[in-house]
Image (spheres, grey):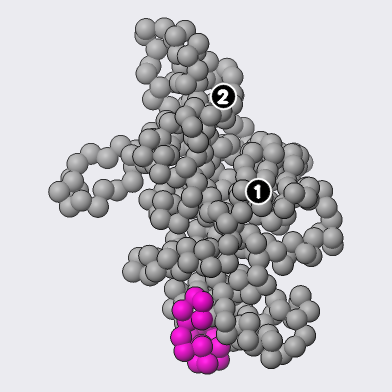
């Protein structure tokens, strides 16, 4: 299966002011390599601020990479000008987190849906209407004749997000970045929206980067799972393997902190990852997780572990799986 999107050692830094005259880089995405295959959903998880959204937007060239390579359908688009990327704006779409700010409150649903079709020069008005109705039907917004005349304030949060789903589908894209698409939706609507997203992926053979901080939803919509920490990818693999047997201590901590829905366990102790993530302006040397890791070894603060295959179909960046370093650890070291 060929890759639709591939990043190779991709870096994207923000610049922030420090003091009156000094600016410093925030290493939001710092040397990330990944690929998303055709008709595949890759879930990207991690704590807030770890670089998930920045990576997703960089793959769309909404943010400019500092270095590395960004490959879309076999074409290197890392340094292509924005003017030359109009084809990408049709072939790659994004679903934003907030359905209240991502659609224009002064336009009705028909106008909101029609706008990208006009921009991409779909000149036949009847064809535009047909495309709009089909997209709204696919996200189960009924009756369509009534929905298209409504304004965003007349819809619930879940209905607004369905509009954004439909708008993303209008131009028949190959790749969609779904940036925490259900985090601001009522719990009662989340499952249905995730089911719609999964159905759309199968119906249109979409490649999806599903960004979330909720690892518990990832297994329902994704084929593979990737875990980010402070701009770095620390683990990736088949979603059931990673969730069933996480290798990296950070992934283990994320999964251990997921609430247990069993009422009999509601008073039991639930482990959480100690401390706070380090500052992305000045991340620690070596493994970035070593300041919070329960298995830290001396090597962890000296060298950065590479993301390598530990088990078939599952990669991790951790010295725990490098026999030579584990054997060198002294008896008194914290495990």
Query: Of the numbered discs in the image, which one, if any, rests on residue 2?
Result: 1
The residue at 69%/87% (across/down) is 127
Q: Is residue 120 left or right of residue 185?
A: right
How many other residues sit within 10 Å of disc 1, few (<14), some (14-19) or many (≥20)? Answer: few
Q: CA distance from mark 2 to mark 1?
A: 28 Å
Q: Which residues are magenta?
A: 137-154
User: Which residue occupies the foreground of this view, 163 or 315?
Assistant: 315
Residue 109 at x, y percent in the picture = 58, 84
The residue positioned 70% from the left and 64% from the top of the image is 91
Q: Is residue 252 one of those drawn in magenta?
A: no
Disc number lying in front (2 or 1) = 1
Residue 247: give x, y in percent of width and height: 43, 31
The residue that mark 2 highlights is 305
* Residue 84 in the image: above or below residue 332: below
Which image quarter: residue 251?
Answer: top left
Q: Residue placed at 63% from the left, 38% from the top? A: 32
Res. 105 image quadrant: bottom right
Taking depth in this image into account, of 221 and 11 the one nearest to the observer is: 221
Spot occupied by residue 277 in the image (x, y as percentages of width and height)? 49, 37
Earlier-in-chain disc, 2 versus 1: 1
Looking at the image, which residue is at 39% across and 12% down?
333
Secondary structure under tag 1 reads loop
The answer to whether 267 is drawn above or below residue 117 in the figure is above
Q: Is residue 313 visible?
A: yes
Secondary structure of the residue carrying numbered label 2: loop
């Amino acid at each position: 299966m060929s890759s639709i999107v591939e990043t190779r050692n991709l870096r994207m830094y923000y610049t922030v002011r420090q003091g009156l005259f000094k600016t410093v880089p925030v290493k939001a995405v710092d040397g990330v390599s990944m690929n998303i295959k055709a008709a595949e959903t890759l879930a990207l998880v991690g704590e807030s601020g770890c670089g998930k959204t920045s990576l997703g937007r960089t793959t769309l060239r909404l943010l400019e990479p500092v270095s590395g390579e960004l490959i879309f359908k076999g074409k290197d688009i890392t340094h292509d000008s924005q003017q030359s990327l109009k084809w990408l704006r049709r072939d790659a779409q994004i679903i934003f987190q907030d359905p209240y700010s991502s659609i224009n409150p002064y336009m009705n649903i028909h106008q909101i849906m029609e706008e990208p079709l006009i921009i991409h020069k779909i000149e036949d008005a009847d064809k535009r209407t047909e495309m709009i109705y089909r997209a709204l039907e696919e996200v189960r917004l009924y009756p369509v004749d009534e929905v298209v005349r409504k304004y965003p304030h007349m819809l619930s949060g879940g209905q607004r997000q369905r509009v954004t789903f439909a708008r993303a589908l209008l131009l028949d894209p190959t790749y969609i970045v779904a940036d925490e698409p259900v985090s601001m939706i009522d719990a009662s609507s989340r499952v249905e929206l995730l089911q719609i997203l999964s159905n759309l992926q199968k119906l249109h053979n979409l490649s999806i980067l599903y960004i979330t901080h909720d690892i518990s939803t990832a297994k329902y919509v994704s084929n593979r799972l990737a875990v980010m920490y402070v701009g770095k990818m620390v683990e990736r693999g088949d979603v059931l393997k990673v969730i069933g047997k996480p290798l990296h201590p950070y992934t283990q901590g994320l999964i251990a902190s997921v609430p247990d829905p069993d009422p009999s366990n509601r008073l039991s102790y639930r482990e959480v990852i100690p401390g706070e993530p380090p500052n992305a302006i000045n991340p620690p040397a070596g493994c970035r997780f070593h300041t919070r890791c329960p298995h830290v070894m001396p090597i962890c603060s000296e060298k950065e572990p590479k993301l390598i295959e530990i088990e078939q179909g599952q990669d991790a960046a951790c010295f725990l799986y490098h026999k030579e370093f584990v054997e060198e650890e002294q008896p008194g070291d914290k495990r």
